[in-house]
Amino acid sequence: MKKLLRLSVNGKPREDAVAENALLLDYLRGTLGLTGTKQGCDGGECGACTVLVDSQPRLACSTLAHSVAGRSVETIESLSAEGNLSRLQRAFHEHLGTQCGFCTPGMIMAAEALLRVNPHPDRAAIRASLAGNLCRCTGYVKIIESVEAAAQEQPV
């Protein structure tokens, strides 16, 4: 059974008929076509589906869409402006924080949440904020260096 879901996605108000048991991940990817949010483990363990709900990281694969009614959801697509990468996206590119790229949107969204509350985190804070995000390609060094580089750059 579907019911009306009202929320903000990437700064735009939305109102869609959504199945009561639909996951936020399926709503974002299937209904809205926001495919930057990845379906990895499908069990809340890899972090590839991390989005921000009211600026807090949330796993879209284990969140019911209707549980975020009336709230603000941000996906990786929200970070770039007018075709320009955000400081985190640019840092991941310039500092080789991306290998295959599958985990990158979730990593960047988790890091974005951190930088909003702690603009100059130390390595321990970065590691803690990314603890729920798994990468099978790297040893995390370049990912952490990418977040550090973004933290050193002033937000635009």
Image (cartoon, rainbow, N blue to C red):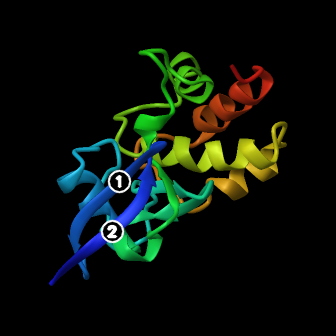
Q: Point out which mark residue 119 bears.
A: none
Number of disc labels = 2
What residue is drawn where x is 84% and y is 37%? 120
The location of residue 139, given as percent across then percent down, is 55, 43
Query: Helix or strand or loop: what does disc 2 sit on?
Result: strand
User: Which image quadrant: the C terminus?
Assistant: top right
| Nearer to me, 40 or 142 | 40
Q: Amino acid at mark 1?
A: Arg
Residue found at x 21% / y 67%: 17
89 on left or right of 49: right
Q: Position of residue 50 (x, y in %)?
A: 47, 56
Query: Which residue lies under the disc numbered 1?
Result: 14
Q: Which residue appears at 71% of the width and 48% of the height?
A: 114
Provide the residue designation for mark 2.
Answer: 5
Q: Quadrant of residue 147?
A: top right
Q: Secondary structure at mark 1?
A: strand
Q: Position of residue 46 (x, y in %)?
A: 43, 62
Mark 2 vs 1: CB contact within 8 A = yes
Name the residue at 73% across, 41% down: 115
Amino acid type shown at disc 2: Leu
> Which image quadrant is residue 131 in?
bottom right
Of callouts 2 and 1, the N-terminal one: 2
